[in-house]
Image (cartoon, rainbow, N blue to C red):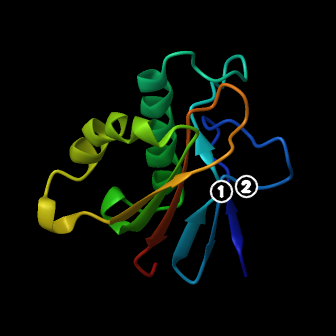
Amino acid sequence: MVISINPPDVPKHENPIPAAAIHRGLLISSAISGKSKKNGEYLPKKPDQIALAFEYLEQIITDAGGSIQDIVKIDLYFANKNDRHLVNPHWVSLFPIKSARPARQAHKSELPDGCCVQIVFTAILSPG
């Protein structure tokens, strides 16, 4: 059975979907963005928005019972693909060991107004 993951400190989606879902150890997130939980708006500065999205990623995987090292792939959807470099400080911080980094792919996407990035990740959690 699929289990929905909805951490209390991660903004809820407008549609009836969870922040992530897990089934038999496979965890896949829905879109994660840098939308403020306080006012429901995207943070105005791109670096702040991206930092908040990565903070939510960490909360989601922790709430699911996993860790950052369980992530096998991260997809990044950008309004402007030239913003990819803004992700790198968070990437290196989360995955400091070069030989233990997940796969990553950047996509150009039509995002909601004010949104510069959405993150989707896939993780394999240990049994138990």
Residue 101 or 9: which is nearer the viewer?
Answer: 101
Q: Where is residue 22 in the image (x, y as percent from the top left)?
A: 61, 71
Quarter placement of the N terminus:
bottom right
Identify the residue at image location x=26%, y=36%. 89
Classify mark 2: helix, strand or loop: loop
Snapshot quadrant of residue 44: top right
* Residue 3 vertical position relative to residue 38 in the rendered view, above or below: below
- Considering only order in the chain, which callout, 2 or 1, is on the residue closer to the N terminus? 2
Q: Classify residue 73 as left or right of residue 93.
A: right
Residue 114 or 51: which is nearer the viewer?
Answer: 114
Q: Residue 11 carries which label?
A: none
Marks 1 and 2, how far apart at CA: 7 Å
Q: Residue 30 carries which label?
A: 1
Amino acid tagged 1: Ser
10 Å crowding of disc 2: few (<14), some (14-19), many (20+): some
Q: Position of residue 72 (x, y in %)?
A: 38, 70
Q: Classify residue 118 as left or right of residue 86.
A: right
Instruction: Please count the marks in the image.
Output: 2
Proximity of marks 1 and 2: CB atoms separated by less than 8 Å: yes
Q: Where is residue 26 in the image (x, y as percent from the top left)?
A: 53, 77
Residue at mark 2: 18
* Residue 70 vertical position relative to residue 35 in the rendered view, above or below: below
Identify the residue at image location x=30%, y=63%. 69
> Which dot, 1 or 2, sits closer to the camera?
1
Amino acid tagged 2: Pro
Q: Where is residue 47 in the image (x, y as percent from the top left)?
A: 41, 25
* Residue 66 vertical position relative to residue 82 in the rendered view, above or below: below
Classify mark 1: helix, strand or loop: loop
Residue 66 or 114: which is nearer the viewer?
Answer: 114
